[in-house]
């Protein structure tokens, strides 16, 4: 592999307090990593596809061991792809291609987006459920929310009012979201979810099964008003389930594990919930993130991409009437993301990681 440190860095790497100290004492190895979180963020995931391929296809397999993958929304879809095959690179490429190829008419209904998402998951994962549930070392955890009150129905008027109420309550304090939703973690039954007791919101844990795998993945990405909620997940408390990112956008969770939490992410900050995106004072809790090593694209790298950013959901509007243009921009970003993976491998293989890491 060609050394690339003479170029402007493509990555920004941040570490929590305990991981900063660990890196001073010893180089990072795959053996250190037992938990990998995956954030909500829709098509942004395509923009770090090359980083995922390097981590899951090249680096972690050097030390096969039990690892928890915990994701909300597209994070859970990425990790289901990784755990669905002995060739994670091919499945990640397939995920990126299927997602990029999606096309939606202007004004598309939530029901139609859900219908297409079911077809998407069927094409990506159908027939691979048993592989995911019996993967030799990956343990999948899918984060969802169970809707309460006015959020527990899909009628646009009441749902819209419910969302406005939730946004207002969240402005006062994040804890008020507990009136509108509760957290669910559908996890591989062979291993407890990789978090300590959750006390911030009402939460429940459910064993992942063949029956609830695809419904849980669909629910985990079901953004209100964009997709329909998923009515009842087998094995979980009754109710209407939606996007896990509503509560756990960037998975600011109390991780419980023996080593480093390796976090391939779209941005170098952790935003607790979906409603916190526009609240710059809402940041991840340093005590919960002290074992995290966050790896994300740098501002310089982002400036080199089409539209100077990662793909995102607004591109469906930005490129309205020009699906070919959107797909071209996304495929360029996906191809460029190989640089992110190359740089990560170079940093861990040369021992240069501690030289570039910054506090989270």
Image (cartoon, grey):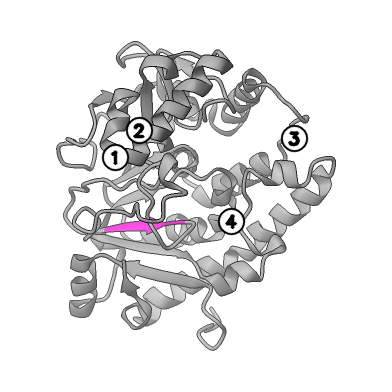
Mark 2, residue position: 169
Q: State yes or no: residue 262 in magenta.
A: yes
The reply to whether dot 4 and dot 1 touch (C-beta < 8 Å) is no
Mark pair 1, 3: CA separation: 38 Å
Mark 3, residue position: 103
- Relative to the observer, which residue lies in front, 127 or 314? 314
Q: Nearer the viewer, mark 1 or mark 3?
A: 1
Task: Establish if 238 lies above or below 56.
Answer: above
Q: Residue at x 26, y 47 (%)?
A: 66
Mark pair 1, 2: CA separation: 6 Å
First-in-chain label (1 vs 3): 3
Residue extending farthest to the bottom is 6
Magenta range: 261-265
**Residue 47 numbered tag:** 4
- Rate crowding at label 3 as few (under 14), some (14 to 19) or many (20 or more) other CA atoms within 10 Å: some
The reply to whether dot 3 and dot 4 touch (C-beta < 8 Å) is no
Q: Nearer the viewer, mark 3 or mark 2?
A: 2
Mark pair 3, 4: CA separation: 18 Å
Q: Residue at x 63, y 70 (%)?
A: 303
Image position, residue 17 (x, y; %):
21, 67
- Relative to the observer, which residue lies in front, 281 or 85? 281
The reply to whether dot 1 and dot 3 touch (C-beta < 8 Å) is no
């Amino acid at each position: 592999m060609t050394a690339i440190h003479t170029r402007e860095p493509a990555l920004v790497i941040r570490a929590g307090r305990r991981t900063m100290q660990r890196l001073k004492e010893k180089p990072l190895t795959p053996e250190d990593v037992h938990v990998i979180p995956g954030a909500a963020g829709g098509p942004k995931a395509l923009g770090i596809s090359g980083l995922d391929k390097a981590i899951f296809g090249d680096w972690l397999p050097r030390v096969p061991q039990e690892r928890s993958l915990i994701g909300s929304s597209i994070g859970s879809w990425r990790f289901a792809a990784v755990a669905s095959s002995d060739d994670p690179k091919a499945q990640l490429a397939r995920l990126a291609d299927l997602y990029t190829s999606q096309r939606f008419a202007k004004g598309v209904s939530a029901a139609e987006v859900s219908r297409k998402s079911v077809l998407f998951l069927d094409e990506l994962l159908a027939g691979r459920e048993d592989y995911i549930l019996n993967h030799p070392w990956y343990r999948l955890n899918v984060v969802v929310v169970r809707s309460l009150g006015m959020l527990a129905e899909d009628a646009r008027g009441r749902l819209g009012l419910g969302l406005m109420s939730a946004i207002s309550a969240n402005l006062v304090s994040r804890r008020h979201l507990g009136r509108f939703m509760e957290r669910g973690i559908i996890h591989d039954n062979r291993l407890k979810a990789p978090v300590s007791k959750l006390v911030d919101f009402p939460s429940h844990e459910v064993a992942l099964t063949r029956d609830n795998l695809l419904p849980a993945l669909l629910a985990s990405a079901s953004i209100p008003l964009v997709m329909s909620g998923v009515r009842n997940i087998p094995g979980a408390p009754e109710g209407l389930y939606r996007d896990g990112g509503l509560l756990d956008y960037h998975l600011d969770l109390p991780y419980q594990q023996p080593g480093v939490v390796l976090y391939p992410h779209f941005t170098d900050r952790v935003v607790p919930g979906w409603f916190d995106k526009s609240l710059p004072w809402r940041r991840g809790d340093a005590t919960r993130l002290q074992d995290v090593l966050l790896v994300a694209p740098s501002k310089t790298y982002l400036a080199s991409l089409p539209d100077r950013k990662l793909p995102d959901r607004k591109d469906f509007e930005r490129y309205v009437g020009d699906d070919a243009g959107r797909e071209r921009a996304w495929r360029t970003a996906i191809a460029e993301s190989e640089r992110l993976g190359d740089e990560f491998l170079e940093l861990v293989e040369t021992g240069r990681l501690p030289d570039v890491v910054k506090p989270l």
